[in-house]
Structures are given as C-alpha cells and as structure tokens.
Image (cartoon, helix red, strand yellow):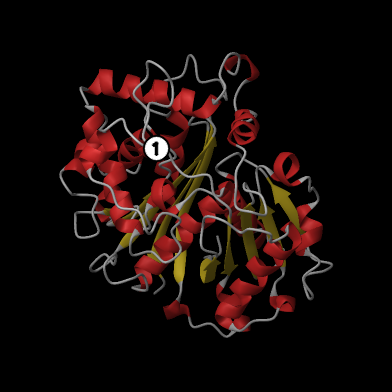
Amino acid sequence: MKKIYIAAFHQSKFGKLMDRTVPGIIEAAVEGALAEIGAPASAMDVATIGAACNFALNEQGLLAGLVAMVPGMEGKPIEAVENACATGGQAVLAVMQKLQLGLGETGIAVGYEKMRDAEGKMDGKLVGKVLGYFSHPEERAGRAYVFPHHFAEIMQSYMAEHGVAERDLAAIAVQEYANAKFNPWAQMSKVQITVDQAMAIEGINRYVIDGLPLKTYDCSQISDGYAALILATEEGLKRLGVAKQDCVEIAGYGQATDPIRKDGRDVLHPAGALKAMGNAYAMAGASPVDVNVAEVHDCFSVMGAIGAEVIGKAPAGKGARYWVEGKAAADGECGINTSGGLIAKGHPIGATGIAMIGWSALQLLGRVPKELQVANPKLAATFNIGGPVCASVCTVLKRAG
C-alpha cells in the first residue's frame, strides 16, 4: 500500500463559533488547512467531510457541495460521512482509502460541529435528544439524556467490576483540565479543578443521572468547532512542495463496528475497539510498548480509563490507575490526552477524531506548547469512538523518515 502522510493540520478554538454559518465554517476549515502549507485548493484531488448533527441542529445537508463551494474544490470526488462521534476519524480513513485506491495523490479531511446558537448558548434538551439518535431506539425510552445515562451505567459497571473509586475517575478529568490550561485551542483553558472539587456535589457539579455515579466534571463539553487534515502520498507531498521530514505518517489504522445496542455486549472490554486498535498496530508493525503519545476518546471520564486499556498502555481494569499514578501525564510513561481531551479541550463531534490525529501529529513533530510536549515522542496512537462504544476508528502515527 502507498504510504500516507499528514501534510497539514488546522483547527479552530473549540467552544463557541457564535454567528458563523455552516458554509463559512467549512470554508474556514478548508482554507485554514491549505494556508498552513501555502497550497491552493486546486492542489487537492479528493476530499471528505464529516458532521454528525448537521441535519438536526443546523438544518443543512449535502455538505460535500459546501466543500465544493471553496474556489478550486469544485468537480472533485467529495462525500460526507457520519459515524456518530467517530465521524472525524471516519472522514480521515475515507480520504486515505481514496488515495490508496489511486483516485488522487492529495486530499483533505474536514470535520465540524455547530452545537450552539449564534449567541453561544446551547439547548441542552435538544442536544440530548439529537445525540440520543446515535443509540438503539429501544435503549432511549425514559432517558432524557441518553448518552450520559449509557456511560453512567458503564461507569458504575467499571467501578464495580474493577474495584475503582469515583475519585480515581475524577483524577482523569483533573489531569485533562490541567492540560487544557496550556492548549490555546481548548474550550476549558481558563478552568482549573482539583480532585476534591471534582468530587464535591456543589455549584455546577452534580450527579447527572439519579442513582448513578456520573458527575458534571466527568462529562465532555458541548462544543462548536472545526478541524481539517491534508493527507498526501509521497508523490502528493512533492506536488505540494512539503518536505517529508516535516510530516507524520499514518503508519497504521483500523476501523470496526460492534452492534449499536449496548445491552448484551461487554462494553468494558469492547471487542470492536480492541480489534481496530490491534489492526492499526499490526499494520504499523508496532506494539503498545512503542507508544508514548496518545489521544483517546474520553467522552466521559470512564472512557479515559478504558481508552488507556484499548491502546494497550494498561491491562483491563487498570486504566484509571494508570492516570492516578501519573503515567498518562505529559512527563509520564505515555502522554495521553495532553490536548485536554474531550472533557476539557471540547467535543465538536465531527471535528473530534480529526483533532485527535492532528494534535498527535503535532506532538510527534515537537510543535505543541512546551508545557504539554512529550519528551522524545516516538509513536502515537489514537482511539476515536462513536455511539455506546460501538464504532471505533484507531490510528498509529510515526514521524516520517
């Protein structure tokens, strides 16, 4: 197979895009990525765009046509993808696969989500309802906030099966808020919390679902934001005038989807996620011991723990302990979610998977803020999920040589 490289990465600050329109957001994502390397849109052969809530929240379809509105992008193979919260990762894979098929040598993957109104406000009930669409219909009844309910149950099961305390999972969120302080793109960069604050039921922090352990600080953000990656083959890099030594190679990837219904599956040991990650490692000719940079899909704090296990940095049930012991810190064994993760960086659904890969690439290139930079970055792993640990997109990245 052709080697595929990340030639450029661009993202907005996550949080609130205020009165920016969907066409304007997509244009900014495409043109922002192109500006990183001084390339015209006409230099792109293919493209893919991903968003999850664009119909329900933005009343907009045919996103591929909006990409084609950017001068120079018209007349190219472009399509939109949706795979719940794994949409961004899926968009990257779609571009890669088109390049592997010989449909071009260069391409751009774009992801966005606009989840707040023109004043930056969100309709919590509407967002909760829309996100609930990404679950099985029979698992929505009586649940006002479907996904917090699902993951509160997962959190409870994880704690019971592995003897993990709420405080251990709260430590994950605390570390991510500490990381976000230094990430200029992070939504929660101005908020810092202690474990005691994350545990205290006061102010904004409450139990989200009665009788279950999930608290406000265990949850990711409702975010606006966009991100884009320019991908290229070796021939494509030459065309773009980008030196290979300034790039990161997507050395391995995997994608797998489990049944959408949560009940009846072992979501604490997610088969599809483990398969996708295993396939990515096998393709890269690597193993977890080689990885010291990672971004995992911590939509809720328990997924920060499970994510550490999926990428192979901790055995089953020991993911939370990995964080508590400081091994996931930027100066630890493997810097996990040094961006702040979904909990503190933000979670604009369609942009999330792209931003995870992009931040990991910057880590490997030594281009993140010094407070977050992993020393001697070797190999990076990313784990992006959609639904109740249903769809999984995993990658392994290395510095191009």
Q: Nearer the viewer, residue 345 or 335?
A: 345
Residue 219 spot, x, y in % from top left? 42, 38
Residue at x 19% of width, y 37% of height: 321
Q: Quadrant of the C terminus?
A: bottom left
With 292 as the anchor, is 12 left or right in this view?
right
Residue at x 73% of width, y 47% of height: 58
Q: Residue furthest front?
A: 203
Q: Residue furthest left?
A: 325
Residue 121 vs 372, above or below: the answer is above
How many C-alpha atoms fall within 10 Å of the one at disc 1: few (<14), some, or many (≥20)? Answer: few
Residue 379 spot, x, y in % from top left? 33, 60
The quadrant in which residue 163 appears is top left
Residue 170 vs 158, above or below: the answer is below
Element type at marker 1?
Answer: loop
Residue 350 vs 32, above or below: the answer is above
Residue 27 spot, x, y in % from top left? 71, 67
The amino acid type, in three-letter code, at marker 1 is Ile
